[in-house]
Image (cartoon, rainbow, N blue to C red):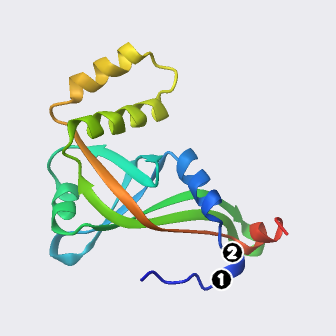
Amino acid sequence: MFREMRRKKQILSEKECVEILEKGTAGVLALLGDNDYPYAVPISYVYYNSKLFFHGAKSGHKIDAIKKCSKASFCVIDQDHIVPEEYTTYFRSVIAFGKIHIMEDETEMKNAIERLAVKYYPTDTETNRNTAINREWKPLCMIELDIEHLSGKEAIELAKTKQ
């Protein structure tokens, strides 16, 4: 169903892919947009239990695209070190593929937004976090991407350092 990576020596393990998703702070969500043009939007996220969670407004291009087609991909770049003298970059990145939907269960939404809040402000108090969440609850839309396939790749120069 999903393509095999051509450059096998550069494949990241599932563990490495998950580590990148756990530490990353933003990525690019790719959806099928208006008139079937790809719609790719930079967005913050949290990874938990083979799923990615996003938040946003209840209307707009992203929401329309999700309602139109449940297939999505999400890319996180972990490293992109430019090496001018080699005319290349030493990169490391992950792409997640899966089904995306707008969350409706309030308990699940609350758990997802709390995980997102803790990721971006881990030292905040529970009281402050709950106040912020409650203030934005009514206009909040939570989105879940259930990962079906995870693919990670790094520059051959980085792969060689592991051997």
Q: Residue 53's x, y, as percent? A: 36, 48
Q: Residue 28's x, y, as percent? A: 41, 59
Residue 56 vertical placement versus 16 (above, below): above
Is disc 2 surrounded by few (<14), some (14 to 19) or many (20+) residues within 10 Å?
A: some
Q: Quadrant of the C terminus?
A: bottom right
Relative horizontal placement of residue 7, taking residue 41 as reference (left or right): right
Tag 1: residue type? Arg
Q: Quadrant of the N terminus?
A: bottom left
Tag 2: residue type? Gln
Label 1 secondary element: loop
Whole-angstrom CA distance, mark 1 to mark 2, is 6 Å
Q: Nearer the viewer, residue 151 or 88?
A: 151
Relative horizontal placement of residue 155, taking residue 93 as reference (left or right): right
Please name the residue shown 36% across and 13% down the image. 127
Q: Answer whether labels 1 and 2 touch (C-beta < 8 Å).
A: yes
Query: Which mark identifies residue 10?
Result: 2
Q: Which residue is mark 1?
A: 7
Q: In which quarter of the view is residue 146 placed?
A: bottom left
Query: Which mark identifies residue 29?
Result: none
Relative horizontal placement of residue 17, taking residue 129 as reference (left or right): right
